[in-house]
Amino acid sequence: MSSNLDQLYRQVIMDHYKNPRNKGEITDGSVTINMNNPTCGDRIQLHLKVEDGKIEQAKFDGEGCSISLASASMMTQAVKGLSVEDATKLATIFYQMMLGNEYDAENFDLGDIEALQGVSKFPARIKCATLAWKAMEQGVGKKDDSEE
């Protein structure tokens, strides 16, 4: 059973890698965060549009391994429509999962993100999986330049 689940998770990761969701730019009223992982060459450019404490839009562009790009695709899907507070809580849950720790998934439906839990077995790949999440946290901490 475990190998079937692992295979399913690999398929979900590869689907997000080959068919990324929310790939592109947001040009109006958004913040842009550039992050990279020099260890393996992953590069993410995240665009967030936050209005009234809610993530209205999230898009990304970049290059890197399947884990980093699939994680960015999953993250942008998951945080769109969430309050900044809920998005940062979700990031905390994700980090706990990446560390192989127990996490409280009852309040949040992890959906496809759960497919990344196997990354915790490969410490060198955790930075790949968390890159877009760290960019999101940095982005929601920035004030929207369009607000005066």
Image (spheres, helix red, strand yellow):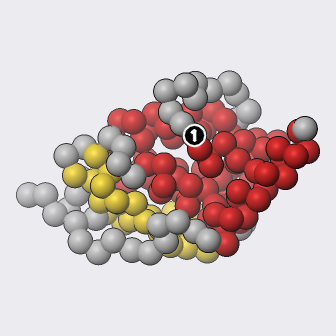
Can you say whether 102 is above or below 112 in the image?
A: above
The residue that appears at 8% across and 58% down in the rendered structure is 148
Can you say whether 90 is above or below 22 in the image?
A: above
Quadrant location of residue 18? bottom right
Q: Is residue 51 visible?
A: yes
The residue that appears at 36% across and 43% down in the rendered structure is 82
Q: Where does the image place residue 98, in percent across and percent down from the top left? A: 68, 40
Q: Is residue 123 visible?
A: no
Tell me the kind of residue under disc 1: Leu
Mark 1 Cα within 10 Å, few/some/many (few <14, many 20+)? some
User: Which residue is at the front of the view, 23 or 33?
Assistant: 23
**SS for tag 1?**
loop
Q: Where does the image place residue 87, in percent across and percent down from the top left? A: 42, 41
Q: Is residue 65 left or right of residue 121?
A: left
Identify residue for label 1: 110
Q: Is residue 103 left or right of residue 48?
A: right
Outermost left residue: 148
Q: Where does the image place residue 141, in percent across and percent down from the top left? A: 33, 47
Quarter placement of the N terminus: top right
The residue that appears at 55% across and 61% down in the rendered structure is 73
Q: Is residue 29 left or right of residue 118?
A: left
The residue that appears at 43% across and 39% down in the rendered structure is 88
Can you say whether 115 is above or below 109 in the image?
A: below
